[in-house]
Image (cartoon, rainbow, N blue to C red):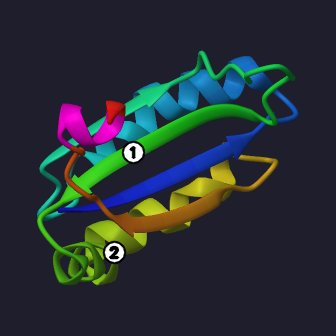
Amino acid sequence: MHKLLVLYPLPAAPEAFRTYYLTQHLPLVAQLPGLRASWHSFQVQGVGLASPYFCIWQGEFTSLETLQAAMASPQGQAVAADVPHFASGGAVVLHMPAEPPLATEARHG
């Protein structure tokens, strides 16, 4: 499994961001070929300090190759081109392989 993580800093117009993101951007994201699951949150809290992010999104793909193909597709290009329409603070985009969880004994041993 491979994950894509998008971190959005606080935009100039938070409510406009939220409305556009929910009504325009997420429907585009849902069309990404190979997207197995996704979630987003506007409730991004820091631990011990304020979070620098207003919104986060995470998507799951079967592999790095599937993610790369999705982002190179017409739908992926439309998703990337749409970001400047709502994210005045830009976005931090990260991807990583998802490691399986450790066994309970290994975590507490």
**x and y percent of residue 94 in the render?**
53, 64
In depth, the one of 31 and 93 nearer the eye is: 93
Secondary structure of the residue carrying tag 1 is strand
**x and y percent of residue 9 in the render?**
77, 41
Q: CA gap, disc 1 to disc 2? A: 14 Å
- The quadrant of the image that shows the N terminus is bottom left
Q: Which residue is mark 2?
A: 71
Q: Name the residue rendered at 33%, 75% in the picture.
A: 71
Q: Eyeballing the image, is 36 above or below 95? A: above
Label at residue 58: 1
Pointer 1 local density, CA inside 10 Å: few below 14, some 14–19, many at least 20: some
Quadrant position of residue 65: bottom left
Residue 4 within the magenta-colored segment of the rendering = no
Q: Eyeballing the image, is 35 above or below 21? A: below
- The quadrant of the image that shows the C terminus is top left
Q: Name the residue rendered at 81%, 36% in the picture.
A: 52
Q: Amino acid at mark 2?
A: Met
The magenta segment is 103-107
Q: Amino acid at mark 1?
A: Gln
Provide the major secondary structure of the magenta segment: helix
